[in-house]
Image (tube, rainbow, N blue to C red):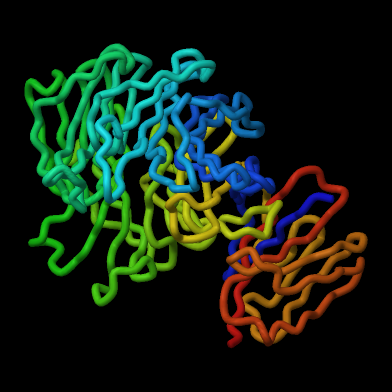
Amino acid sequence: MRILFLLITLFFFPVAAQSQFLWNTVHTDYDGRYYYCFDAISSSVNVCTAAGILVDNTAERIYMKLWRSTDCGLHWNIQDPGLPVDSNLRVTSYFTKIQQINAFNAIAVGLKEGIDTLHVYEDSALIVRTFDGGKSWQRQNLHIAGVSRDIHFFDSANGILHIQENLISHGSVFVGFGRERIFTTTNGGIHWDSVAIYIDPKGSNATFPVFCSGPGKFKIFYPPNGPVFSTTNNWVTIDTSSVLLDRANYPQKRYFFYGCNFTLGDTLVAYGSYLFDTTQLSQRRMRACIVRSVDGGRNWSKPQIFYDSIWQIHYMTSLDRDTVMANGEGLNEFLLSTDKGKTWSVESLIISDSTLSGYSSLGLTFSGSGPLTIYAPEYNPYRIPSLILKGEYKKNRVNFSGDLSYNQRIYPNPAKTTLNIVSVEASTPFKIIDVLGRTVMNGMVLDHNTLTLDISSLPRGIYYVLVERADIKGVYVIAGKFSTVGK
């Protein structure tokens, strides 16, 4: 039996074409003996690759693995990049970024046996590459003690890499990080050239987003507020943009931009969070923030802050398509743009085939048939079980006056003590879930009847009505969401 979502908006609007993504689990986080911790995901049309670790609880071993899909993320096959395993469930290796360059070429970076309190590993900055669709993976060693943080290729040959070196003091690891190293390649990473550009170290595990737009054409974003360094002649000359937010125009403001979305043109979108309460550095004191430039970073728009949305943005899909998505940390929400990142709306993330809550995102990409994202059910994004979700894009005409498609109706909205569900169809099971995906009420709506529910005990907030229908193939969005004004 399929599930049909009936989601009622807070206010009334005229009939319009409503679009929304509905999410289904395409790779679970646990199957008994093993659990999976996905670190990164990328796609090129129908081919997708995810990177992460597989934990074998029985053997007490941790394996660095890659997963490949050739049908837009519906089915996955595991691949072994040939990296040694960690023992005794001690996680010191992980991926930070992967790029599916094309159907046969992919590259993943991260840290392999990198940092602990006793040792420094010379070649801990991890780079693994495939040229044959994942049949074989090759390790590309730069013999640097550090973390490979970001990678981007224009094509199978030309790319740029950011590595953050470890700080070493008296032969042991110092708590912190060292130089920011930039490398470029013209032969797919078989050989990497160090870039003679000095970037002040941040002293923290910051990622410097990098971008390659062609042979000798590169861009680097300097977090958390810029500038952007760019070149069109392989760093012979360097252009520097303005900072995103200067202290003169934004006094006492605390903006942290973790990432920057580049295009082949001059449009840039930086994303991160805004700390609206400086009394406590916690996730709940932050809100998602986006700032945009259309002239290569010389001028930036006023920051757009999403006070009622997710706390931080860590991932954003390409600006090359009209539909752009962004997510990070927050409860069952993501940001959606249908005009290449010019304007944004807050969308609810509902996992239709599970009651799990999507809390912390660890990756986001667009395949040929829709988005894929990695979500963990807890805040801590470091090596905890996670799952891959696939979004399906649907369009339906919706009458927001309350007379819904398929002869369904719920009212009032917002509701205080009672909620009415009307159906003139055959008997249909329903359930009401909160924003965490937890079922708070369920029952049966009989045909040609109005079911009146006592919701006085529900806390104030946003809720969703899910109505099962056996005669509908697929999952369809009928309308928005309803709220309560109770306790």
The one nearer the camera, 190 or 451, is 190
Hey, which quadrant is residue 130 in on the image?
A: top left
Q: Residue at x 19, y 46 (%)?
A: 172
Query: Where 122 falls versus 352 (above or below)?
Result: above
Residue 486: percent from the left, percent from the top?
Answer: 60, 85
Residue 237: percent from the left, percent from the top?
Answer: 7, 24
Query: Where 267 falls versus 439 (above or below)?
Result: above
The one nearer the camera, 297 or 355, is 355
Q: In the rendered picture of this protein, how many numbered marks are placed on residues?
A: 0
The one nearer the camera, 384 or 367, is 384
The one nearer the camera, 287 or 293, is 287
Hey, which quadrant is residue 332 in on the image?
A: bottom right
Query: Where 372 falls versus 106 (above or below)?
Result: below
Horizontal side, residue 70 vs residue 188: left or right:
right
Residue 67: percent from the left, percent from the top?
Answer: 55, 31
Residue 262 is at least partly visible in this image: no
Q: Residue at x 40, y 29 (%)?
A: 108
Hey, which quadrant is residue 439 in on the image?
A: bottom right
Horizontal side, residue 268 vs residue 476: left or right:
left
**Which of the image's four quarters has the C terminus?**
bottom right
Horizontal side, residue 308 vs residue 206: left or right:
right
Residue 395: percent from the left, percent from the top?
Answer: 64, 45
Residue 98 is at least partly visible in this image: yes
Query: Where 324 falls versus 193 (above or below)?
Result: below
Q: Residue at x 55, y 45 (%)?
A: 60
Q: Residue at x 51, y 18 (%)?
A: 103
